[in-house]
Amino acid sequence: MNWEQMIEMRRHKESTAQCPFDARNMSIRYLSALDLVIGSLNHLERRAIELRFVSPRPIARVADLMGMSWDGANELIDRAALKISKALATDQIAFIGSYL
């Protein structure tokens, strides 16, 4: 991949990425599960998700604020979002529902 392709890929990702969750349309049970899942992320993952999707900021700004490269921030955000998605797709929601 040449430099121009890499820049274009980054621009596309920055402009098309959306929050992996939308709290406006979630049930209390789902929000409780989401809260537990986000709480299980490490400090860097939580911070990256907060900066990228809650604030929201582009990956380049997240990288600057966290003192890392664009690629490092991108990997961190992708890894955290994947953990959130996997956890919410499992029986964890059923587990939490028993406590509500």
Image: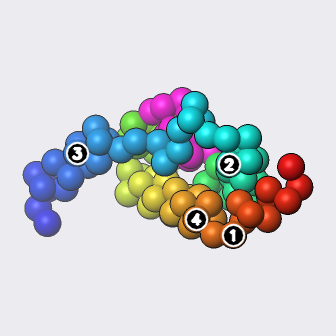
The residue under label 1 is which amino acid type? Asp
Is residue 51 in view from this perspective?
A: no
| Residue 58: percent from left, percent from top | 39, 37
Q: Which of the two labelled residues, at mark 1 and mark 2, occupies the earlier sequence position?
A: 2
Q: Residue at x 68, y 48 (%)?
A: 30
Pointer 2: residues within 10 angstroms few (<14), some, or many (20+)?
some
Q: Main secondary structure of the magenta part?
A: helix
Q: For the residues carrying marks 1 and 3, which lies nearer the camera in this image?
A: 1
Vertical placement of residue 25 versus 100, above or below: above
CA distance for labels 1 and 2: 12 Å
Q: Number of marks in the image? A: 4
Question: Disc 4 designates what residue?
Answer: 89
| Residue 29: percent from left, percent from top | 74, 47
- Residue 12 marker: 3
Nearer to us in this view, 17 or 31: 31
- Residue 91 marker: 1
The residue under label 3 is which amino acid type? His
Q: Which of the two labelled residues, at mark 1 and mark 3, occupies the earlier sequence position?
A: 3
- Residue 30 marker: 2
Residue 5 placement: quadrant: bottom left
Q: Secondary structure at mark 3?
A: helix
